Image (cartoon, rainbow, N blue to C red):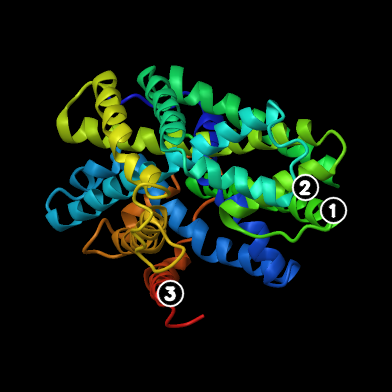
Amino acid sequence: MREKLASRLGFIFLSAGCAIGLGNVWRFPYVAGKSGGGLFVLAYLACLALLGIPVLVMEFAAGRAAGRSIAKMHESLVPEKKAWQLHGIGGFIANLVLMMFYTVITGWMLIYFCRMTAGRFTGLDAAGVGAAFSSMLGEPLTMHVAAVVVIAVAAIVCAAGLQRGLERVTKILMVCLLALIFVLAARSLIIGRHHALLGEAVNVAVLDTGVAIAAGLIIIPACFAFGIEPGQGPGLVFVTLPNVFNSMPLGRLWGALFFLFMSFAALTTVLAVFENVVACVMDYTGFSRRRACRVCGVALVFLSLPCVLGFNVWSAFKPFGEGSCVLDLEDFIVSDIFLPLGALAFAFFCCHRYGWGWERFLAEANAGEGRRFPSWLRLYCAYAVPLVVFAIFVLGLLRRFHVVQ
């Protein structure tokens, strides 16, 4: 019998922890500020309600009904339809590729937390802070050791079990994360069938969006207050914000708290995704949990090397032209390929008879107490959602290759 989460709160925190990541902090505030502020947030919330929540409910329903990882989910739900197992293989690969670079970036957060706490940035001007980040990228041993620490933490936590390890640690990290968000924002200004799944999806979406908006309340006012232009991506977190902290009273303290918050945000994602990888390996091989954690941990120690070396030894490799590196390629594979195609596959799987089917999806989604997923949304979920997701997929490719702006 596959181990399940002990509580509803554990499921919500674990799901939100997987959704809450670095994009909430280094992408959302910048795009919101550049794209109209409040109007962008309203458009974002509309897309979340119309696309994100329906697809999230589909994922929850299929996963809960199967009681298996995505590797064997389709085999459990529609054993006679072998082609759907390709979706499971794609899901496993996507999680693995994500861990190849996310563990490295999480390692950066730990490095900067330690260096900020030690006062390594105190007194540096903007050029000095930028040089410190470039210097770190030129230290493959330092970056890989930090990534290995992150991988080891994930392996140890997941090896302890779903309830005693992953759920317990995720609850602690999420409580600390939300508390740190509150402090910083103020300074700047598996599941049982007891609950229907629409409410759970809404709770996860609210937590994820709340963190993104709170990150904006932390970053944008702080940048403008000290006359520093906010950017996006690694430059925002590792260059712009250390300059902000150097400009404010008790900046060393607030900087340390910020990078502690970033470490928690990244680590909650690492733990959830590592569990996905471990669950797939257990389903594919029949390994015990502890053995699967060891195998996945050792594999990721080596699989994280391309991302680390892409900034130094392999810096000549520029997959998308000048300024790109291995990290950009790995991010493209996950964000622009697997994520939209995965959402597209779930929409077809749950809404059409050649997949799992609408009736079975709806029965699972509405099992238990709470908000019911509306049955009258069938045509919308079956046709409109896939069409919009496919349009997003194509537009993402066109923008990546500079066909459109």
Label located before the other in sequence (1 or 2):
1
Which residue sits at x=23%, y=34%? 281
Question: Given this view, does label 3 or label 2 mark the residue nearer the observer?
Answer: 2
Question: Closer to the camera, 46 or 295?
Answer: 295
From the image, tell me which residue sits under label 2.
244
Which residue sits at x=41%, y=38%? 140
CA separation, marks 1 and 2? 7 Å
Q: Is residue 115 left or right of residue 283?
A: right
> The disc labelled 2 sits on which kind of residue?
Val
Q: Residues within 10 Å of mark 1 (few under 14, many from 20)?
A: some
Residue 240's place in the image compared with 393, above or below, is above
Image quadrant where one finds the N terminus: top left
Which residue sits at x=56%, y=66%? 47
The reply to whether dot 1 and dot 2 touch (C-beta < 8 Å) is yes
Question: Closer to the camera, 18 or 238?
Answer: 238
From the image, tell me which residue sits under label 3.
384
Residue 15 in sight from this viewpoint? no
Q: Residues within 10 Å of mark 2 (few under 14, many from 20)?
A: many
> The disc labelled 1 sits on which kind of residue?
Phe
CA separation, marks 1 and 3? 45 Å
CA separation, marks 3 and 2? 44 Å
Which residue sits at x=24%, y=27%? 295
Query: Where does residue 312 sit, x and y in percent of width and height?
Result: 41, 47
From the image, tell me which residue sits under label 1.
226
